[in-house]
Image (tube, helix red, strand yellow):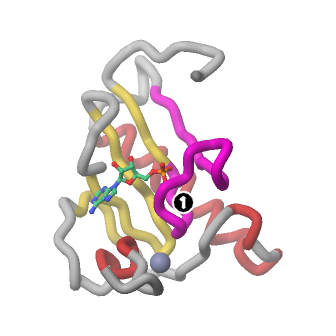
Amino acid sequence: MNKNRCLFCDIVSNKMNADIVYRSDSVIAFKDIHPKAPVHILIIPKEHIPTLNDLKPNHQNLIGEIFLAAQQIAKEFGLAENGYRTVFNCNRDAGQEVYHIHLHLLGGRQFHWPPG
Ligand code: AMP
Ligand code: ZN
């Protein structure tokens, strides 16, 4: 793959397949290809933002929309009552692998705290 190509931008533009579960004008969500829990969904902005460090004040509504999408998807997948975890990994120490911000929505099992 081209060094400058972004996997998640390719999913946004339909160049790459994904199991999409939510779509709005500015956000999409799809199933993680290597799920770490019975439900593992990634919620991403359509706009390419590499890391949380790159957020600007004008992204405030977008981030709010991502969390409201997580709330809605959690409800649709039956996770709301038992609970679920949401995670943004930022940069190397957090284990970020794809440099297009994504909110992990994980549910369907018991999670540990603190995380590893
Ligand atoms: P992170 O480590 O926070 O950057 O998470 C990246 C996530 O993207 C991992 O959980 C991967 O399993 C997931 N992932 C990578 N490629 C794809 C893909 N083509 N479709 C869906 N999920 C993917
Ligand atoms: Zn991207």
- Is label 1 in a helix, a strand or a loop? helix
Membership of 89 in magenta stretch: yes
- Toward the right, the furthest residue is 57
Badge 1: few (under 14), some or many (20 or more) residues near its Cα, within 10 Å? many
Membership of 20 in magenta stretch: no
30 relative to 16 in the view: left or right: right
Q: Position of residue 71 (x, y in %)?
A: 48, 44
Q: Which residue is mark 1?
A: 66
Q: Residue at x 25, y 58 (%)?
A: 21
Range of magenta residues: 84-103
Task: Indicate yes or no: mark 1 CB to ligand 1 under 8 Å.
Answer: no
Q: Residue at x 46, y 28 (%)?
A: 84
Q: Residue at x 59, y 22 (%)?
A: 115
Q: Between residues 92 and 52, which one lies in front from this camera angle?
A: 92
Callout 1, which amino acid? Ile
Q: Position of residue 1 (x, y in %)?
A: 30, 80
94 relative to 66 in the view: left or right: right
Q: Residue at x 40, y 53 (%)?
A: 42
25 relative to 54 in the view: left or right: left
Q: Between residues 73 and 14, which one lies in front from this camera angle?
A: 14
